[in-house]
Amino acid sequence: MVVREDRPGDKRLVAYVVPAEGTEADAGALRRHVAEALPDYMVPSAVVALDALPLTPNGKLDRKALPAPDYTATESAGREPSTPREELLAALFAEVLGVPAVGADESFFDLGGDSILSIQLVSRARLAGLEFSVRDVFAHRTVAALDAHSRTAPSSAPGETAGVELAPLPADELAALVAAEPGPVDVLPLSPLQSGLLFFRAAGQALLARHANLRAGFRHEGLSRPVQVIPADADVPWRELDLSGLGEPEREAETERFLAEERRRRFDLSRPPLLRFTLLTLGDGRHRLVLTAHHLLLDGWSSPIVLRELFALYAGHGELPPVRPYTDHLKWLAAQDRSTAEAAWQKALAGFEEPTRVAPADAEHAVSDPLKVETALSPERTAALAERARAYGLTLNTVVQGAWALALGSLTGREDVVFGVTVSGRPPELAGVESMVGLFINTLPLRARLRPAEPVSRLLARIQDEQTAMLDHQHVGLADIQRQIGIGELFDTALVFENYPLDDGEFTGLVEASGLRLHRAAARDAVHYPLGLKALPGDQLRFVWDFQPDLLDRHRVEAIAGHFTRVLEAVIADPERPVGRIDVLEDAERRRVVTEWNDTDVEYPAGTPVHVLFEERSAATPDAVAVVSGARSLTYAELNARANRLAHRLIGLGIRRGRPHRPRRRGLRGGARHRPGRADPRPAARLRDVHLRLHGRPEGRGQYAPQRGASGGGPVLAARQP
């Protein structure tokens, strides 16, 4: 069953069934059968029979592909309404159900009615002068049957309560309570919602009592190592904020202001619990429950478990299954072979020499609230990518990791890259680990060595094999790995593939089974890396790019996301393409890099010798840097002075203007012509063949001395550099 909202504000519970082979589904009979076993609010408004349930590329139910029920399929079935009251009831049925017309013998519930819509029907009927109850609607479902059991509404104002007395407490308790107050007071009972909100707070308290690690505080000052301290009990922090008196725009603005402030409010790690609840009252029976928790307590996998238990405790659904304590995980960690795991990481990262960064290194950078860029593949491209992964025996996670490795290689110009990946950290050998609550995840380095001639498919398979080989060593902390490697920071980007075992429909059903209606659920988290990539699988593969705005701007992140998307498209198009032929540039970028940046043509006098042009530049900008070699540089004036000294020494050796010579470094300032000899094709041999050698052994500042005995038999000029 799913909750659909095919008309704005009109949410209905719809059941989808797949009949057994050789049978047919009777929607009416199924609804009647369900109504006998479930409360009214859990009876679906419609039952839709399908040949098969639609699935996403990941094999999960594709809720967006479920067809909308056709509430008008039996439009005006049976006879037409025949009396004024039947006509009024038929019009009310059609108005509430959102159908064009209703026949006198059609069932309210077969046309899509439910308990919520039945309340609307009763209310509108009273305004129209008819009186019947919600129970009457369930017992007498057609226009004709309800007509026989409806009455003319009394002339008094609807909902008049004159003469009704409120008695919230027995007389003795009421007297004692009033006597304890300093002045006159009214003592009133609670509305069902008020009772429910108190139960919510009690459910939160029960949650803390159920999971000891949610009561943890953390201490490190004066200790040899940090520890978590868990008190026997802790009061749940609970706050209520009433925004119902504000207009809609002001209420939205105040809600956003509160949420931003809530994200900025820091926890004192030594004062548990490191979570808090806030209930916002929005008006019209709408509320927003905000749970803020420190990441030290929970990971993304644990969050939906906590929420499921919270609503189960609120609804009072019997006993929850026993908790497997978080301490069992800590004991498992303590029992692992740490030295073997650290040796495995040393081997995996052997030879890696410098961190892979996409943002400038900034030791003074303070982590702030990140900004976000969101991108997605279309459903068609998502399905095509998933099909490629299946065909090559790869997980979709591996394909995303490999695509990011290729994008990083292009961004950094390196063939050996490392980035962070988040792993669940839940050891399968720990029974019940999938339902445990706590911080299990770990961020670890993924190294990808990019070989230009290797097919992309082989790169992806290699990444998957290498990651599989490290599964038994994923419990080692990143700080310990970096300390073992001796590099320090290894990367500044992190990737998480969020594929938590959360069934949205199950969660929605649990909330609504507690008597509440879920409008929407949302989560907000943050990363401390300059760039974080979150992959969200589904019928569309979506990506959320979190970035620190003082290190990367939005335009840069959007360009990076574009590079990454083009790598995914290349994988879809041809997984056998060599790594070196993956093109991440869009047309505009390619034109800028290939054409515009290489447009270096400069107009200069074609008949003017190079040494004359050099002298003109030297005279115009004598202090400008002319040449750079490593950490050394020479200005135009310094280079000109050296060229003059060398030219005069060459002239002293007999080189004259117009006389042919064969040195590899031309005596342009001496005016001699260059006659090229037969060049050895080997670069090293060509260098050895240079007759005029400039040595770097200092024997005096700016002095040039001829030497003999070099290959070629001619004089060798040794330059003593200053």
Image (cartoon, rainbow, N blue to C red):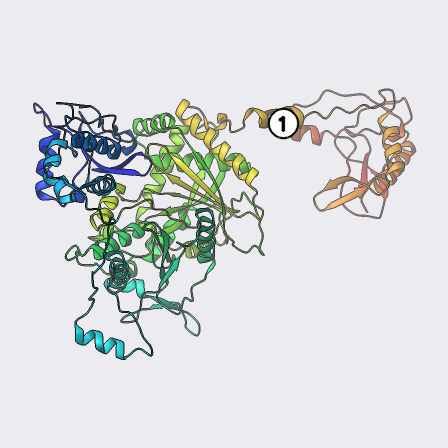
> Neighbour class for label 1 at 10 Å: few (<14), some, many (≥20)?
few
Please identify the quarter of the rendering in which residue 329 is found: bottom left
Q: Please state which of residues 717 and 28 is positioned toward the viewer in this rendering.
A: 28
Q: Position of residue 293 (x, y in %)?
A: 37, 58
Q: Position of residue 268 (x, y in %)?
A: 43, 67
Q: Residue at x 29, y 46 (%)?
A: 518
Q: Is residue 417 left or right of residue 608?
A: left
Q: Residue at x 27, y 44 (%)?
A: 501
Q: Please state which of residues 286 and 588 is positioned toward the viewer in this rendering.
A: 286
Count of labels in the image: 1
Q: Secondary structure at mark 1?
A: helix
Identify the residue at the far front of this view: 155
Please identify the quarter of the rendering in which residue 671 is found: top right
Instruction: Report if residue 567 is visible in the image.
Output: yes
Q: Measured along the vertical axis of the image, is residue 629 above or below residue 282?
A: above
Residue topped by disc 1? 592
Q: Residue at x 16, y 40 (%)?
A: 43
Q: Position of residue 152 (x, y in %)?
A: 17, 41
Q: Please state which of residues 625 and 138 is positioned toward the viewer in this rendering.
A: 138
Q: Amino acid at mark 1?
A: Arg
Specify the quadrant that holds the N terminus. Answer: top left
Q: Measured along the vertical axis of the image, is residue 237 above or below residue 422?
A: below
Q: Position of residue 493 (x, y in %)?
A: 48, 45
Q: Is residue 283 left or right of residue 644?
A: left
Q: Is residue 541 left or right of residue 634?
A: left
Instruction: Report if residue 574 is visible in the image.
Output: no
Please identify the quarter of the rendering in which residue 17 is found: top left
